[in-house]
Amino acid sequence: MRSILFVLSLVLSSLIHAQSVTQDAYQVLRQDAQGYAEVIPNRRFQFPADHAPHPDYRIEWWYITANLSDPDGNAWGIQWTLFRQSLSPTPMVDGWASNQMWMAHAALSTPNGYYPEQRFARGGIGQAGVSSAPFTAWLDDWQWQGDTTEPFPSRLHFTTADWNLTFELQSDKPWVLQGDQGYSQKSEGKQASYYYSQAHIAIKGKASRLGKTIPLEGKAWLDREWSSQPLASHQQGWDWFSLHFKDGYALMVYQLRNTHGKHWLSGSWISPDGSSQTLKADDIVLTPQQRQTIEVLRLGQKTPTKITLPLAWTIELPQLQKRWHISTPYPNQWMAAQFPYWEGVVSVDEGKSGMGYMELTGY
Amino acid sequence: MLQLIKVSKAFPQPDGQLTPILAGIDFQLNAGQSAALLGASGSGKSTLLHLIAGLDTPDSGEIVVRDQSIMTLSEAKLAELRRHTISLVFQQFYLISTLKVVDNIRFQAQLSQRYDPAWEKQLVDRLGLGDQLQKYPHQLSGGQQQRVAIARALLHKPALVLADEPTGNLDEHSSEQVMALLSELVKQAGSALLMVTHSRQMASYLDQAYWLKAGSLHSEVIDT
Amino acid sequence: MKGLGLSLKALLSHYWCYPWQALFLIAGLCAGVALWSAVQIINGHARASYEQGNQVLGAQAYYWIRAKDETGVSTADYAQLRRQGFREVYPVVQGVLLSAKQQAIPIIATDPIALPVQAIQTNTSATEFNGLAFMQAPYQAWFPPSLARELGVQVNERLLLKDGQTMPPALLQTQTQQGRQVLLDIAPALSLLKRDKLSYLAVTQLSEPEKTRLQQSLPAHLSLVENRQSVDLSQLTQSLHTQLSAMSLLSFAVGLFIVFNAVRFSLWYRRPTLRTLRLMGVSVSTLSLAIAVETLVWSLVGSGLGLALGYLLSQSLLPTVSSSLQSLYGANLGSDIIFQTRTLLWAWLLTLGGLILALALPLWQQLRLPVLPSNTLSTHWRSDQRTRKRLLIAASVLALLAIFIYPLIHQLIQGFILLGMVLLAAAWALPALLASSLKLLEYLLPPDSFKARWLIRDGWAQLPALRTAMMALLLALTANLGVEMLVGSFRTALSTWLEQRIAADFYVQGSSQFKLQTLLDDPNTADWLAAVNERTQISLRWQEHPLLLRGVNPSAPDSQTISFTQALPDALKTWQAADSQQQWVLANEQLHYLAGVKLGDSLALETPQGPVAFQVIGFVHDYGNPYYQLFLPNSLLKRYWPHAEPWNTSLWLKDQRFAAQAEQALLKAGAKAGDWVEQKTIKSLSLSIFDRTFAMTAAMNSLTLWVASIALLAALMAILQERLPEFAQWRALGVNRLEQWLVMSTPLFIWAGITWLAALPLGALLSWILIHKLNVMAFGWSMPLLWSMTPAWHLALLTLGVILFTLVLVAWQLRRKLPQALAQLGAQA
């Protein structure tokens, strides 16, 4: 779900003057799905076919985050995201006249710094895309390459700043269909998406820079989501969490912040074997604990801006009698893209219970 | 005030021969005095005046103005002398045609930084130029133009006024008027006046008269 | 300093009373500075554009990736390079579309999101760049405003093309380095051009290891070429800019004549003022200082106004220059003009220099004299005679020098110096010529006629005043005639050459899908096709210059009638045979004149098999081509460059009535509508390019003539002012108006006539130098000089018109002022 912002960024991509159209971009998210395929319940997911793009739908993404550690036990993290958008509800054509647009965000979180980067490409000419046989997702040389038609096992390669990153990803657990069998409702209205995840991915690889190579290892998370109208008119932003616990369980929780009325909460509790339980609004208590002011550099600006974010939270699942404190070791994980957001490594109970990723948008 | 000692000047003729015009002239004029210089055409009256004004140099002799010999003065010093000490009034008026009458009158006074508004008013009134100040010289009659030239020459109260046939371009009536005014105002200004004229009538307005003949100067008693 | 202020007031009050003198002074300064600075601004602007020549649409392109066979780069190859991580690479499509009205529309296209620039910049802040609209149907076509005006395209209009397609809706805005091209997204560009390949890939800066990696990653059919556009453009266009500069300096010189006249007159009139000032005790040094201040003021006013005017002028001239540059060299000029400090400073210094030149001499003469000089008319005349004599001597020396250096001239700039010397010598000799005409008149007219004597004496009185104006007129007439003749000769030569070169009925583009073999295989083709010439082309670099190799069919009709400018014996036959051991080629004369290649010389060229020597057997005209070019039989070209692709194919019909049939056959053979052009289209396109190229020259030319007319007018007005009292005296003496006009205008007409006559041979000489020295050195094109009296008659009429106009103006002034002058006559008597 977190990646709804992709649409924002796409519309606000380098092609458009960021400041002047920020509000309009939100509007695009809330646009009627007229002409595009609609998200309806009871869809049967088919793999590996559903790993490939669904160009009938307006937006879609392939979203990897991973919590990693170096040999000294320091926390590292990566984000690698590929976004697709159909610019018009016309049938997709190949070549330069294609209506498909691609965008990618990548970031590396290290104990010494945060390195984000964004890229754009048009569809139809082979510069970016997702294909099966074998499974490949790419934009320029940012590549996620499967050995088979399935996304795992696979290799992920990308660069950000002067870091060169290569990883191997493995998973043998079943796909988690979020919401109601993959139908993920986003509001009381008909805003919804198709949403499936893989929470149990073993990741291993290395980060190199200036001739120095650091081996990294950890757990990754994949989200796949596509939709045509994911956001309601009164929804302003969201807070999203994916957590890996030391006992092998995993949790996904998000809230869509409404400008008035109650926020829309949802999530899933995933067992070590990959089976999952959907969490409804009543099952989750999400409370911001502490607001922290950080200095960020917005795109196109020379001087940093101050921004205040809820960087510490408590998550409670009363029925499961669980309560965790979420905080981040690295406050400045600000994706300074055309449309900026905070996305980065968080620890659960200061790392005693586990690690995870948090995404905060609309601040 | 003004002293000429053995001043000589000769001019070359078309045939290459030198013709002496002035031959050892001795002359003296005291402060506040006026003198007329009479002589026939070509007798060298104007040449003598030009020599005194530093516009030309004598072949030999000495010209002393205010105890200073002008023979050794540079062009700039001579200009300085004319600016502060000597005023010139000519037959052809020599007004600046592109400046208004008032600017013409004030010109030299401003140049020598001795502009005196009260004296200016007196001069203008006396010379009857009150209505002409905003006009250009060419809009004035000859007599009026000469009055402007006189006003200009006297406004800064120079020690010496040199006049070369100031009434030469004027009719008899105007001449009388201009001459009367000139002699009166020069006295008021306290200036010495040396005037070149061919008219005994005009010479009679002044204290003394001299006759220039064959290159030398002869004192003359004026019959009144 | 009191003296300085008062003196300045007295001196400057002159212009207050005679405002037209100030006007002419300003006019002269302005005219000179404006023309000069306009050209400087344009040149500076063009050079700045060339420095950005290595950029494509705002991004630095240090290299190109091009197909070795020049057929373009496939999208797949491009995507492959991007997937290998070469994000420095971005795609460019360039081409020319033909509008329904047969106008050529150059287009450039890229992928805005692959363009490695911070953000797409629009020069019109009013419209925000909407990338999605740019990249999605119906797309956008960004027209530079000047091009839109030229083509008559309105905002949002969809321009109809010859092949029936329409361009995307037009927007009037530009991206950096778009130049005189329409910017499109790649998708509509490829579809409008009916292509499926990119023209080339541009590459931004690469580190050495990255460059090596890129070279190794390139497929065999692509090559990485260093972008030398900027260097090439500077080299290629240098001559054009030198030519423009020379023209502008000529205008400046003509302007200076006006200034010289105006300053001289203003000093002359102010002699009484100067004298009175000195009588009142203003020293010579103070006066000099006052005049220096006046000069400074005039130089500032003149250069300021001149620059402002020049800026406006450059704005209106820029489109012609940029279209010249684009049609000749493919150079793209931006449309924003900026002033360079250098131009400002130079304009001021030139003005000041000109003024000092015009002021210093007369002032020095004036102040050197005693305060009350025995200045009679006769001494004035004597000094005038002396001046004439000195000018004549200087002119003779200059002319001798010019004759002496003529054979030594090898550089364009030296050529212009020669030109300047000839013109100046002619101008300086003119007063003596005018004076001798008076002497002749004196001799011819009855000596006992009082009126004749009067007329001649009056002529002598007018001569010093009119001298300078006549010199300016001579310069302007000569320059005008010379350039007219050059352009006329060139146009004739070009038309003749086009007749021979563009002889076929149809020309089919090489990049199209057209297959000649398919056409030839069709049994019906023989019914209508008379002959065919398929040409191929390869472009190389030779001696750091681009060199084109054109392969042609040696037996085609247009290969049979090649006319040589120089050739070895039996050149055509030997060249056509192409089977001998020697590799004979024809070369364009640019190679002869610009690179110094001589008949029989060998050129060592890089072929895929290594260097091969080609021998020049003949030189041919190749007007309009800025590059070196060799012509060789297709078989020979294919032998060394087997991958050479068709460049174009020309078809001769057996009869014009087969045209429709031929077009059908072309379609069948794979060509699409718009892939071929007819002979007449090419010819008219070529001639229109020619006219555009010389539009700037023509504009400068007529402006110079206007400046000279002002000079004449100024001089006559000055004479009038100076002599008004004299005219009044004439009137008082009973001279009637007719007699007065006869005396006043006869010398004027005689001298204008003499000046015009002198301009004829001088103009011919000028155009001869332009054609045989400068044009050859600048472009490497030679042509015969064609003498024509038509422009001479035009100029005669124009000069007559100017004189009549001036006389009417003078008559009107005289009528207005004479009564006053007469009145003053009485007052002063």
Image: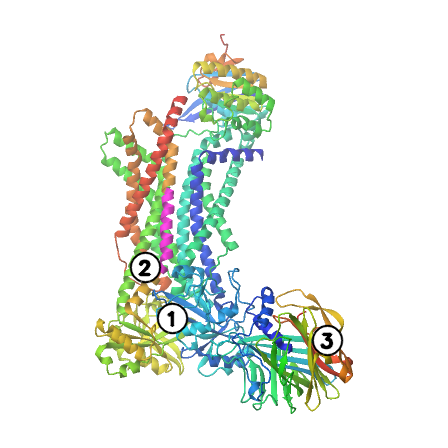
Q: Residue at x 41, y 68 (%)?
A: C167
Q: Is residue C524 above or below residue C393?
A: below
N-term-proximal mark, 1 vs 2 = 1
- Numbered badge on residue C165: 1
Q: Main secondary structure of the magenta part?
A: helix
Q: CA distance from mark 1 to mark 3?
A: 57 Å
Residue flagged by tag 3: what amino acid is it?
Answer: Tyr
- Which residue bears the numbered disc 2? C771
Q: Residue at x 38, y 43 (%)?
A: C710
C125 left or right of A341 in image: left
The chain ID associated with circle 2 is: C
Q: Which segment did they paint magenta?
A: C691-711
The chain ID associated with circle 3 is: A
- Numbered badge on residue C178: none
Same chain, marks 1 and 3? no
How many other residues sit within 10 Å of disc 2, few (<14), some (14-19) or many (≥20)? many
- Which residue bears the numbered disc 3? A330
Depth check, mark 1 against mark 3: the one in front is 1
Residue flagged by tag 1: what amino acid is it?
Answer: Gln
Residue placed furthest toward the top: B224
Q: Say which of A96 and B36 sits in front.
A: A96
The chain ID associated with circle 1 is: C
Work out whether residue A285 can be spotted: yes
Work out whether residue C212 can be spotted: no
